[in-house]
Amino acid sequence: MPVALPVLAVAVGYAVWRGHRARAVAVVLAMAAVPVLVIPLKLWIDRTGPLTTESGYYPSGHTATAMVAYCGAALLLRPRTGREWAMPVAAVLSAATGIGLVLRGYHWPLDVVGSWLLCGMVLALLVTALRCIDNRRAAGSGTDDA
């Protein structure tokens, strides 16, 4: 989180500076959905971690945060800028975060996979929202007022 959230903040600032406020708001709302989805699941499932008897490890909140932050930043950087490298980099960073959490013993592999699946759905909704925003912008006056 100390890396993923600042990366997202910079991308949101860049999008707002470039006049893409509605896109930035959509990505921020997707990021805000992460704790809203993850925390109740952690409480409900009450799964213990691999090296502890404490519970609340499924799904991995750090994996979810990294995935939505990195992929959200990539989605903000990519449109009409020629930055096709952004999404593959975001995918590698998201995967590395999850794998690192498993290798360090903080999470079971299923905790990470569960977060990837959950956030995949969040990102699919985000992509749909961004397409709607882009279509509205193309059909309208060309402004992106949120």
Image (tube, grey):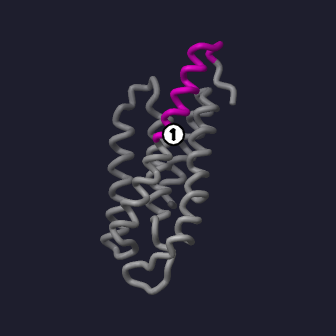
Secondary structure mostly seen in the magenta stretch: helix
Which residue is more in the foreground, 52 or 45?
45
Residue farthest bottom in this picture: 53
Q: Position of residue 90 (x, y in %)?
A: 39, 46
Q: Which residues are magenta?
A: 124-142
Question: Is residue 115 magenta-colored?
Answer: no
Residue 131 drawn above or below residue 109? above
Q: Residue at x 35, y 47 (%)?
A: 91
Question: Is residue 137 magenta-colored?
Answer: yes
Quarter of the image where the C terminus is located: top right
Q: Residue at x 40, y 74 (%)?
A: 106
Residue 104 drawn above or below residue 121? below
Q: Position of residue 142 (x, y in %)?
A: 62, 16
**Position of residue 103 in the picture relative to residue 52 (left or right):** left
Residue 80 drawn above or below residue 28? above
Which residue is more in the foreground, 53 or 72?
53
Which residue bears the numbered disc 1? 125
**Position of residue 129 in the picture relative to residue 114 (left or right):** right
Residue 53, picture quadrant: bottom left
